[in-house]
């Protein structure tokens, strides 16, 4: 015999299950849509305005100049918008790695990334101008290039590809690490050196007789540990924060090339933001950029001092003669990039950089 009471309870439970199931499906749908929809809406906010959540993915440590600036930007934007605009930061490649993040940005899965300019050469090879070895004497020259018409041309080129360049951030000048001393040109023969994927960086090491190995940032530690590569080039802050230098016995203070970033936002997303939000984001970013450039310089100096203090590392400062020999081989790479710019900008680049 059917127990009517039980059957009603059962029906009720089933109803509950169905509602719960529907809610799960709806939440999943909403989560899925977040990947494509530009704005996340927090329905619990009491404010009549929409809450805006932007995801910022990057590959380095929170303690690096890029990581610190990302945090400061997020904190200030949150404060200044009264909690309405939130930038959620995913450092260390936890969300997207090199080789994934540009695609994720273009598809709108993430709203902000800040890759090294070297990694943008896959979209426009003229980004390679920042990679030119021994071309910049100091960061001021790099800023002149980034903040002037050359930086503007690169912004325009990215805009056409659906990406907005919001700022240019520094890391600093690169030094070399290896499992043997790198002093004379012949020392590079046959060495496998990790590079960021950029044609100029590839040519730089080919010219030195080494074997360039493009690897994404998150693969470097393991590649050094397993001797898949003999060495690499990076800034003191990256070498220190990721402990790469501890896997190497020799460091050459070459300061041969620059490493910096473009802070990028998906263009459709940028255009979809209201005027007030855009202003808070950009005004704050301007201030943060000035601060970022200052602390990047300081942190690289401090991290270099820490590396120098490590008893297990042998440090070599390039002598003027060695530097001259390296420059003679590497400086001509500028002629492979500069002709790619319009005539008026070619002379601009030559005015800033140092070819002699
Ligand atoms: C690298 O790949 O070595 C750097 O671009 C990482 C970074 O973002 O500083």
Image (tube, rainbow, N blue to C red):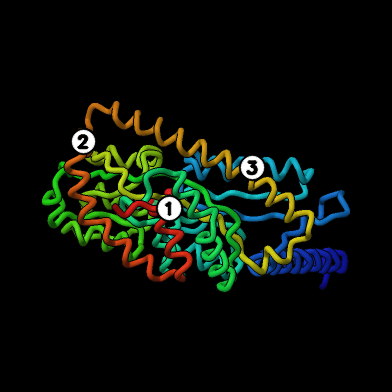
Query: How far from the left and from the top, in percent, is residue 56?
Result: 59, 53
Image side of residue 330 versus residue 20, left or right: left
Query: How far from the left and from the top, in percent, is residue 344?
Result: 48, 67
**Element under label 2?**
strand
Q: Nearer the viewer, residue 51 or 162?
A: 162
Check if mark 2's residue and mark 1's residue have beta carbons within 8 Å.
no
- Name the mark on residue 287: 3
Looking at the image, tell me whether mark 3 or mark 1 is earlier in sequence order: 3
* Residue plotted at (43% across, 59% down): 349
Report the mark closest to the observer, 2 or 1.
Answer: 1
Q: Nearer the viewer, residue 317 or 119?
A: 317
Asked whether mark 1 lies closer than 8 Å to ligand 1, one says no
| Residue on which disc 1 sits | 352
**Element under label 3?**
helix
* Position above or below: 175 against 216: above
* Position above or below: 308 against 204: above
Mark 1 neighbour density, 10 Å: few (under 14) some (14–19) many (20 or more): some
Asked whether mark 3 lies closer than 8 Å to ligand 1, one says no
| Residue on which disc 2 sits | 316
Report the mark closest to the observer, 3 or 1.
Answer: 1
How far apart, in angstroms, are the residues tagged by discs 2 and 1? 29 Å
């Amino acid at each position: 015999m059917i127990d009517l009471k039980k059957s009603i309870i059962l029906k009720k439970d089933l109803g509950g299950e169905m509602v719960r199931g529907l809610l799960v499906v709806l939440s999943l749908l909403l989560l899925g849509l977040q990947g494509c929809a530009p704005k996340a809406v927090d329905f619990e906010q009491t404010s009549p305005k929409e809450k805006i959540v932007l995801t910022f993915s990057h590959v380095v440590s929170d303690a690096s100049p890029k990581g610190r600036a990302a945090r400061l930007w997020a904190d200030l934007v949150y404060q200044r918008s009264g909690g309405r605009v939130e930038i959620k930061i995913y450092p260390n490649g936890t969300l997207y790695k090199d080789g994934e993040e540009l695609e994720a940005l273009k598809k709108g899965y993430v709203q902000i990334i800040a890759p090294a300019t070297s990694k943008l050469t896959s979209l426009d090879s003229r980004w390679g101008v920042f990679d030119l070895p021994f071309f910049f004497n100091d960061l001021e020259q790099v800023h002149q290039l980034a903040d002037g018409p050359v930086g503007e041309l690169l912004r325009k080129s990215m805009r056409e590809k659906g990406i907005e360049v919001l700022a240019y951030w520094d890391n600093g000048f690169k030094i070399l690490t290896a499992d043997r001393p790198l002093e004379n040109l012949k020392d590079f023969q046959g060495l496998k050196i990790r590079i960021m994927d950029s044609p100029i960086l590839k040519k730089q090491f080919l010219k030195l007789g080494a074997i360039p190995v493009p690897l994404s940032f998150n693969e470097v530690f393991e590649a050094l540990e397993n001797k898949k590569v003999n060495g690499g080039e990076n800034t003191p802050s990256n070498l220190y924060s990721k402990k790469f230098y501890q896997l190497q016995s020799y460091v050459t203070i070459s300061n041969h090339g620059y490493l910096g970033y473009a802070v990028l936002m998906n263009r459709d997303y940028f255009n979809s933001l209201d005027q007030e939000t855009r202003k808070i984001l950009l005004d704050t970013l301007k201030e943060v950029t000035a601060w970022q450039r200052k602390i990047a310089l300081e942190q690289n100096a401090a991290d270099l001092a820490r590396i120098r203090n490590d008893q297990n590392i042998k440090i070599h400062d390039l002598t003027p003669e060695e530097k001259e020999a390296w420059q003679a081989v590497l400086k001509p790479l500028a002629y492979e990039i500069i002709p790619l710019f319009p005539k008026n900008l070619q002379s601009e680049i030559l005015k800033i950089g140092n070819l002699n």
